[in-house]
Image: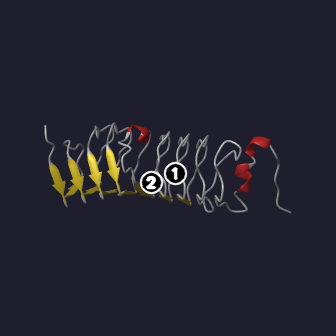
């Protein structure tokens, strides 16, 4: 069965999508909470001010897709189609989501909340976390080589359990690399 190909279309305030391939489409103020995105393909699409919380991402494909101002709680990105998986997030809430074992190199997370988000065994090489809240985010066996954490906060990353070479941190955030030692670090 062939799925429809939809190109350059703007969708506003909708709650579901038909299976298909969406190319350079814009989704604005849509409530996709608990929606079924399984096997839907998004190419160079923009999601603006949408709620995608708990959406089913089984084999959903995101290629160069941008999310801005979106609520994205509890999403299981590891269920996505891994081929060409690439996206960026700005002013998004991704709390309680999971990127377990995904390869998402050079991903930008900007002004976003990633509390309790799982990055276990994820390949984040050369990604940027710009002003992100990473409280209780899980980094274990994660490739964070060349990742920029300089403006992010509340992270706890064990350098012994992750590939960390050339990752960038601010002096004030360095305590997040020493949490397991239960040290008291004070400024003079």
Residue 146 falls left or right of residue 26: right
Q: Which residue is mark 1?
A: 113
Q: Any mark on residue 92, and which? A: 2
Residue 139, percent from left and from top = 60, 43
Disc 2 element? loop
Residue at (73, 62) in percent of width and height: 171
Residue 40, percent from left and from top = 26, 43
Residue contact at pointers 2 and 1, CB within 8 angstroms = yes
State whether residue 170 is above or below residue 163. Answer: below
Residue 18 falls left or right of residue 128: left
Residue 20, percent from left and from top = 20, 45
- For disc 1, the neighbor class at 10 Å (few under 14, some 14 to 19, many from 20) is many
In which image quadrant can residue 52 be found? top left
Q: Is residue 75 visible?
A: no
Residue 146 falls left or right of residue 53: right
Q: Is residue 4 visible?
A: yes
Residue at (35, 56) in percent of width and height: 65
């Amino acid at each position: 069965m062939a799925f429809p190909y939809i190109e350059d279309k703007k969708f506003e305030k909708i709650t579901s999508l038909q299976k298909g391939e969406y190319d350079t489409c814009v989704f604005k103020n849509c409530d996709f909470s608990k929606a079924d995105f399984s096997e839907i393909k998004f190419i160079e699409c923009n999601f603006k001010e949408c709620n995608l919380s708990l959406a089913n991402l089984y084999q959903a494909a995101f290629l160069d897709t941008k999310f801005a101002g979106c609520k994205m709680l509890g999403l299981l990105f590891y269920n996505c189609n891994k081929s060409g998986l690439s996206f960026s997030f700005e002013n998004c809430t991704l709390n309680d989501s999971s990127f377990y074992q995904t390869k998402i190199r050079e991903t930008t997370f900007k002004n976003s909340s990633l509390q309790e988000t799982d990055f276990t065994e994820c390949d984040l090489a050369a990604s940027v976390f710009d002003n992100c809240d990473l409280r209780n985010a899980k980094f274990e066996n994660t490739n964070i080589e060349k990742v920029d954490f300089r403006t992010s906060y509340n992270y706890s990353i064990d350098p012994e359990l992750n590939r960390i070479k050339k990752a960038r941190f601010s002096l004030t955030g360095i305590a997040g690399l020493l949490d397991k030692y239960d040290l008291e670090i004070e400024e003079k």
